Image (spheres, rainbow, N blue to C red):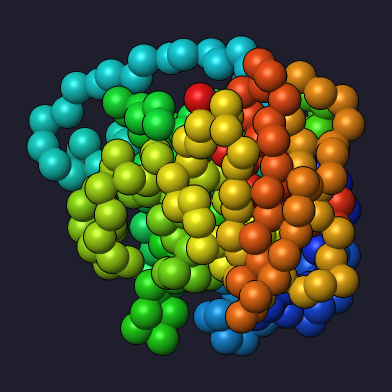
Amino acid sequence: MKQLFILLFLLSYTANAQDFSFIEQKVANYPKFIKVEDLATKISNDFTSKEQQVKATFYWLATNIRYDLDGYFKPRRKRISFRYRNEQERLEKLQAIKDEIITETLLTKKALCEGYAQTFAKVCDLLEIKNKVIKGYVRNSSNDINNSKSSSNHAWNAVKLDDKWIYIDATWAAGAVTNNVWVSAFNEYYYNISKSNYFKTHYPEDTLWQLRVGRIEKEDFYNQPIYHSAFLKSNLQLVSPKKGTINGKNTVEIKLKNLPSSKSVFLGYSGYRYAIKPNTVTTKNNITTITTSPPENSKQLFLIIDKEIMLEFLLL
């Protein structure tokens, strides 16, 4: 599943951004491969280190495969079942299903999250890079706050480099949706997602892959605010509220750490076309307090800094 949010302007004050300039110089001129083996061979020939090869695979997928928006809004549910006589045959048939997904992804140049994740994994396999497709949960908007799902709704990847697992989401790196139209926009944030931010956006289904990062209950994952990548790429920290639900009948207070005084702050509300200024913005000891009075009947609050949506809350 793809994260849906309003695509505005690129954030100018980011921290620890991944540098893809060297990768882009080469991969931007790659042809639109239709065979995964050809893609892997090209990457192997052009890049010597495993890290560069992983970055190149991530970049090519995120910039050449469009998200299948029709498939997202109108999912074609297909139940797959098969018989097998032993474990080897079971694994072979599972791989055949994955290969079919990969082939369709490269032929059509569009995919849902499974297509991105399986294609990424296959290239890594061909490059002899240890990896794992991770199934789990993501939240797409404030409508998902406090609304835990019973089955996983997303797939992404883990890759082992220098004896450390890093986490990669080529689907979310490929772009965003604005006004129900897919807009391609490479987002390097989703390469090597930091462990400190991982559970703000992704929650693995498998307990093992949760514990490799830390501990958080599924209920707590769903009860957070929605963190947009613009916020996570910045040096900002949310002091309060840490829960995603807010009493909209009272004055709302949002506290942030490390907000530069030069940044513009606005609040957006569902049902209202234009963003509004806060009631007050005050800073003390590097903690900025933003207050706002939600309009009647609005159900969602969006914190906007320098014309970029940073956080979403659900108003009760």
Which of these two is toward me, 17 or 14? 14
Q: Position of residue 77 (x, y in %)?
A: 46, 13
Res 261 → quadrant: bottom right
Residue under the point 79% across and 68% down: 27
On the question of residue 98 being in view, the answer is no
Which quadrant does the N terminus fall into?
A: top right
Residue under the point 84% across and 45% down: 277
Res 104 → quadrant: top right
Residue under the point 37% across and 57% down: 132
Q: Is residue 249 left or right of residue 145?
A: right
Q: Is residue 262 above or below residue 16?
A: above
Q: Position of residue 192 (x, y in %)?
A: 53, 69
Q: Position of residue 235 (x, y in %)?
A: 65, 74
Q: Is residue 215 above or below residue 45?
A: above
Counting the numbered discs, the total is 0
On the question of residue 258 being in view, the answer is yes
Residue extending furthest toward the left: 86
Q: Is residue 27 above or below residue 274?
A: below
Q: Is residue 166 left or right of residue 227?
A: left
Q: Is residue 303 left or right of residue 162?
A: right
Res 226 → quadrant: top right
Which of these two is toward me, 245 or 199? 245
Q: Position of residue 62 (x, y in %)?
A: 70, 53
Residue under the point 73% across and 30% down: 269
Which of these two is toward me, 316 or 161? 316
Q: Is residue 30 left or right of residue 250?
A: right
Which of these two is toward me, 274 or 309? 274
